[in-house]
């Protein structure tokens, strides 16, 4: 617990908590403008509005936000003699990386909570939609936290290996492009469950009225996402720990 709190303190001092608000805000503003401009064509109310919000958020904003957060989480370790201190710590590599993963996951969970809150506020107060966001939207947002775990683990691994702040973020962007290409070229299926960014995009688009063949929010789909996310995260976590345990003091 102490290591997790230490990681959260590092992230707080980096002001990245602002990103947990700015990215959802950008997605909600974009979705609200798109919905308002095409309200006559988008006749499904909350479902249409939610789809407009998450279409770009799922394809790009969320995964890129994670990439920046992961680079920030490892930036301090690459400065000065901090890497030497990290390698000299008595904690096991799995514990060090686990603390990074947990702290980043908490930030992503906050980001999703902010997204849901802003969606409800904008839908009710700005667009004047009747009722409330359907449970499928909430379920997709929560499932997105689970689907984001492999992206967190992958970006943490890249940020651990590369001292540059921007390079892992650029690689994350390539992952987003590849994920979108896989999903929207008809090559989904197993591949979409193996590519971390594609898993995020697919999960957030479940039940979407803006994406053809988006899939529905049901138990088998959720179980497949959770299983894929757990397997990928465990694999990347163990791989990163194996690499870290063999890195030399520099």
Image (cartoon, rainbow, N blue to C red):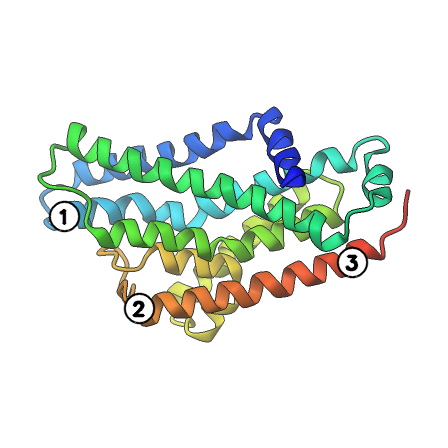
Circle nearer the viewer, 2 or 1: 2
Q: CA distance from mark 3 to mark 2?
A: 36 Å
Q: Position of residue 156 (x, y in %)?
A: 64, 49
Image-based side of 103 in relation to 117, left or right:
right
Image-based side of 13 in relation to 148, left or right:
right
Q: Position of residue 181 (x, y in %)?
A: 45, 62
Circle nearer the viewer, 3 or 2: 2
Image quadrant occupied by the C terminus: top right
Q: CA distance from mark 3 to mark 1?
A: 49 Å
Pointer 1: what residue? 42
Identify the element where label 2 is drawn.
helix
- Most extreme residue toward the front is 1
Q: Earlier in the sequence, mark 3 or mark 2?
A: 2
Which label number is shown at residue 8? none
Q: Earlier in the sequence, mark 3 or mark 1?
A: 1
Identify the element where label 3 is drawn.
helix
Circle nearer the viewer, 3 or 1: 3
Identify the element where label 1 is drawn.
loop
Residue at the spot x=52%, y=68% of the render? 194
Tags 2 and 1 touching, CB below 8 Å: no
Q: Position of residue 216 (x, y in %)?
A: 26, 65
Tags 3 and 2 touching, CB below 8 Å: no
Residue at the spot x=48%, y=27% of the render? 18
Look at the picture and state if 221 lies above or below 120: below
Q: CA distance from mark 2 to mark 1?
A: 27 Å
Pointer 3: what residue? 243
- Most extreme residue toward the bottom is 190
Image quadrant occupied by the N terminus: top right
Pointer 2: what residue? 219
Disc 2 residue crowd, few under 14, some 14–19, many 20+, Cα 10 Å: few
Residue at the spot x=25%, y=56% of the render? 208
Tags 3 and 1 touching, CB below 8 Å: no
């Amino acid at each position: 617990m102490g290591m997790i709190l230490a990681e959260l303190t590092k992230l707080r001092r980096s002001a990245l908590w602002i990103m947990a608000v700015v990215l959802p805000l950008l997605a909600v503003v974009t979705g609200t403008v798109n919905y308002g401009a095409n309200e006559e064509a988008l006749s499904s109310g909350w479902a249409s509005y939610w789809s407009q919000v998450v279409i770009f958020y799922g394809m790009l904003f969320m995964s890129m936000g994670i990439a920046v957060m992961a680079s920030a989480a490892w930036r301090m370790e690459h400065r000065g003699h901090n890497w030497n201190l990290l390698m000299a710590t008595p904690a096991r590599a799995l514990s060090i990386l686990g603390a990074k993963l947990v702290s980043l996951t908490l930030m992503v969970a906050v980001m999703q909570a902010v997204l849901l809150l802003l969606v409800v506020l904008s839908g009710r107060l700005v667009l004047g939609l009747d009722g409330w966001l359907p449970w499928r939207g909430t379920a997709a947002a929560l499932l997105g936290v689970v689907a984001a775990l492999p992206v967190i683990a992958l970006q943490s691994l890249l940020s651990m290996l590369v001292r540059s702040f921007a390079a892992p973020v650029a690689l994350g962007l390539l992952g987003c492009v590849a994920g979108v290409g896989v999903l929207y070229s008809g090559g989904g299926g197993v591949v979409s469950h193996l590519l971390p960014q594609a898993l995020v995009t697919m999960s957030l688009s479940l039940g979407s009225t803006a994406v053809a063949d988006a899939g529905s929010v049901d138990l088998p789909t959720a179980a497949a996402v959770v299983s894929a996310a757990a397997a990928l995260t465990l694999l990347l976590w163990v791989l990163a720990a194996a690499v870290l345990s063999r890195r030399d003091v520099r």
